[in-house]
Image (cartoon, helix red, strand yellow):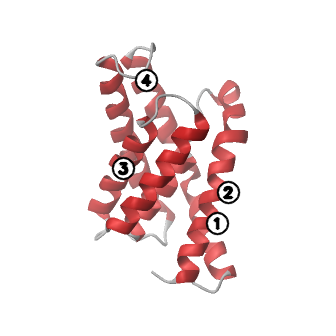
Amino acid sequence: MSAAGALATLWVTVLVLVLQTTLLPHLRPVIGVTPNLVLVLAVYVGLRYPRALGALGVFVLGYFLDTFAGGTLGFHTLGLLMAFAVAAAASHTVRTDSGGPLVVVVFVAGCVEAILAAGLFALGIGGTPSWLYVLRYGVGQAAGAALLAPLVLRLVGWSERALGAG
């Protein structure tokens, strides 16, 4: 991992966190879900940096999302780490420079995150919505994230080229 590549990923991470916690929640009344761009970034990191440093980065990313987005502390962190694990397992066969495979991995990782969240809600951990509502919302959120994954990938690629890493 080059310093410029890490700096580019960090810059995109800050931008995605700001978008995820400020602007994207306003899309929920219009389209029914809030696309999870942080999930896309966690999958990207899992595919590009599938080792311990990548997992640490995703943990910090999830912790910041838990802190700034509200809700039960640890939900986003655990879900993003599961998404990272799915992406890291696929990292030997999926390339990060094309949008198609990334879309599939983001959707699968988002569904895994939704199943995890629904299971936690079914156990009574996390709040009042039913586990079925959480599962439906999570799959919709995964689909929205998968549709926006190529845009996030282009943003990372552009920032890497701008910083001389790509």
How far separated are the C-alphas under marks 4 and 1? 31 Å
Image location (x, y in percent) of residue 37: 57, 49
How far separated are the C-alphas under marks 2 and 3? 20 Å
Q: Residue at x 49, y 33 (%)?
A: 140
**Residue indicated by mark 3:** 81
**Residue indicated by mark 4:** 134
Nearer mark to the viewer, of 4 and 1: 1
**Is label 2 in a helix, a strand or a loop?**
helix
Image location (x, y in percent) of residue 149: 54, 55
Residue type at mark 1?
Trp
Q: Residues within 10 Å of mark 1 (few under 14, many from 20)?
A: some
Q: Residues within 10 Å of mark 3 (few under 14, many from 20)?
A: many
Side of 45 relative to 24 (left or right): left
Quarter of the image holding residue 45?
Answer: bottom left
**Residue indicated by mark 2:** 15
**Residue indicated by mark 1:** 11
Screen quadrant of the C terminus:
bottom right
How far separated are the C-alphas under marks 4 and 2? 26 Å
How far separated are the C-alphas under marks 1 and 2? 6 Å
Image location (x, y in percent) of residue 25: 67, 34
Q: Residue at x 39, y 34 (%)?
A: 114
Nearer mark to the viewer, of 4 and 3: 3
How far separated are the C-alphas under marks 4 and 3? 18 Å
